[in-house]
Amino acid sequence: MNEADSFAEIFRGGLPHCLLIVFSMLLICSPVMPSEFEVISMTKFDVNGQHFGSRVSAISLEARSLYSWNTSRHCVLTRLTDLSIHDFDKLRQNAGGLILMLPANILDLDVETRELVTILEQSMLSHAVAVPIYFAPYNKDLEKIIDDITYTTTDSVATNQTALGQLIVTVSANRYHINVGGGSIVANKNSKVPIIQGELIPNQLALKPSESVTDGQKLPVILITANLKTFGIYNDYPLNADAAVLFALVELFSKVHYTSSMAPKYRLKFLLSDAGLLLNFQGSKKWLEVDDNALQNVEFVLCLDTITESLSNNPDNALYMHVSKPPKEKSSISNFFKLLKSAAEKYSNGLAVEGVHKKINLADSKLAWEHERFSIKRYPSFTLSSVKSPRSPIRTTIFKNDESQIVEHTLNASRIIAEALASFMYKVDSASGIFDGELAIKEENLLPYFGVKSILHNNDVKDAFEKYLSNVKIIYDKPDSRDPDFMFYNDHDVKLNVYRVKPAIFDLFLTIVIGIYLLTVFLAIQYFPRLYEEVSKLSKEEPVGQLNGHSSERLKMKSH
Amino acid sequence: MTLYHFGNCVALLTPYYFTYKYSGLSEYGAFWKCVQAGGIYIFTQLCKMLVLATFFYSDTSSSSSGEFNFFAEIFRCSVDIADLLGFALILSRIPGKGHSKLITAGLGWATAEVVLSRGIMLWVGARGTEFSWIYILKCLESNVLLVQHITTATLIWLFTRHDLNKALKPLVSLLLAVTVFKGVWLEGMIHILAIGPWLTVAVKALVAAIIGFCTLHIYSGLAQQIGI
């Protein structure tokens, strides 16, 4: 009774209001202490109506290992190197999400694993993916979590067959709840592919007095094209050796044009566009549409594609010349091929030049090589590449080798191309070695261009083009609003949160244990008077103790 | 589900209620007295904070890194003597008879401590998605603290009695000192021996039980002597 009065007394004053405020404050306080990790979303883009990368971004699911997931309510958390193509094919339709931890250093992997990683990359970039995919940079804590979920599942399958063992594993197992935010993914209305072109006009002084400037314009054109890779499986910058070679050629030939007294027989045009293979060479397609008569008087089109393998597993040291139809004898392409071969023999360190012929497959939704864009329009064209098959996964990989290797190979390749091109243009013997001595291609010429990220990045590309070339022009390919050829998507910075959780049965188990504990405490309090009595007896024996039986009796009474 | 876990943690605090219910406090209507004892706890803590903030250099960097700083702990514990003054205040101000007076003081103090120092942590943490054993451990530890606070209240009461046997006086003072400086010697030992969290609670429970038993022994002697 008295107790009830006391309660009433408390609530009579302004206390309820205080309580309301306190409780609302407590409700606002969000749970803390999740482990937070950086993640990078997989690239999302459309080409020719095909979607690549998932259009879903949020994940809030239970984390499972590669071996234990089975429904779309599981998000698979694993290492990129553990994933196989077969697993990925199952995952990309049926799982709830996929989070891949990148290896700490791709160069530490053995050759087979690296090959597998690139093949996996290619598979991700060539199939529609329904589930959200994220890449997490290497992180020790995340690795522990991955180990934990992998270990628990394999252990429970292997050793504990008894029901009790299963129960203990279920109760004690750590589970993880994964949460990735990420807003809605919307098409970027400003998607565009920039294309930059420039022209190297023959030195006016070198021309004979009778020839005027207009005659210079009539010279046949050699077009050199390359693509800047601006993304891979995620938004990072892949190796852009092709662009570096293109810039090296621009620099070299502008020097040659201004120093040599020889008048070239050709005009050199350079074309560089963003995002090549992955966007089906949209840049050159647009350029061909815009500049219809630019190639009226073309000698040939030279496309650079993957001049250096960014992640060479076993560099087979060859330069392949890919053509859509075998060049006729005495044609300019066959002449160039021969010059290239002799240049390679002379200057390269064992770099072989081979020709590869592949017919254009018009049924394919995607072109294999950039020169096919030109060959379709019946311009003589070919691609120089270090990869033999157009399906090589190296062409789209985002991972890079260590730079010294790349630079060496690129130097080598650009030397050969430059020599062959120079002897073709000036009709000199390829053995003369134009790019020796003063005009030699050095590492310093090449290195700055490896850092080129995009045509629109800081105007670097534009400045370089304007420095050496004339008629520099940037055009943009924008997707049609009704029937877009390609489309990019807005990306958000997202964070991966991993919460350690316990299964429902665990809390039930805990309740039982707590119940037992409380019962023990209850009994202990019930029997406390008896303990007190015993202690009193002990004290009684001491001389100071005076017997007084009241206290223990009273305590007993209280306890009832 | 997580609210259920919060429930589990709160269930671990039921011994407070058991103590209140089965020690006879509920029959005396001592609820309001417990609340008053809690109020004095709050007052004491505020005073302590004031002193700590004014006179002591707070080295947050060392305390957050988990290192055990011996001297800082000694300083901190010397401020904890204020706790004893707080208990003395409760015992002198709040009327009560015999055993119930001590239990009221200890229970009120311990309850106020649990609500104020553990309440928000439990509400925010144990309800969260992330699971951690720490909440269960903290709740178990508060059970130990309940025993300890009742012991401390008894010790203070014994300390203030003039009719206590002179021979026992030094022992009571020693037990009080041991209780106050528990932060130094017990935490230091746990730190040096690198005892895990579960064992830490067990060791604390053992220490509290030993001190409690000694106190009970002294108390029962005096209680018989003066007849309560």
Image (cartoon, rainbow, N blue to C red):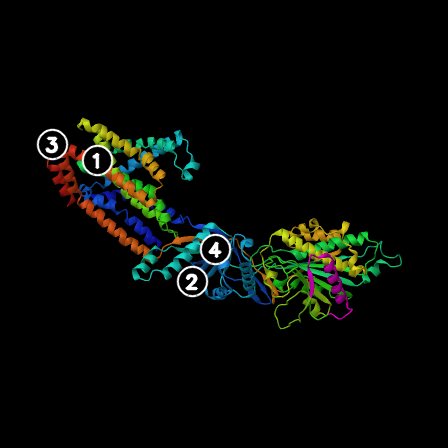
Seen at 75% across and 66% down, the residue is A333
- For label 1, the SS is helix
Q: Which residue is mark 4?
A: A181
Quadrant of the rendering where the C terminus of chain B is positioned = top left
Q: Say left or right for B70 vs A326.
A: left
Disc 4: which chain? A
Magenta highlight range: A327-354
The quarter of the displayed image where residue A544 is located: top left
Looking at the rendered image, the disc whose residue lies closer to the viewer, 2 or 3, is: 2
Q: Are marks 1 and 4 on the same chain?
A: no
Decide if residue B64 is in sight here.
Answer: yes
Labels 1 & 4 near each other (Cβ < 8 A)? no
Residue located at (81% from left, 57% from top):
A202
Of pointers 2 and 3, the one earlier in the residue sequence: 2
- Image quadrant where residue A475 sits: bottom right
Pointers 2 and 4 in contact (CB under 8 A)?
Answer: no
At x 32%, y 54%, the residue is: B4
- Neighbor class of circle 2 (other Cα within 10 Å; few <14, some 14-19, many 20+) is many
Q: Secondary structure at mark 4?
A: loop
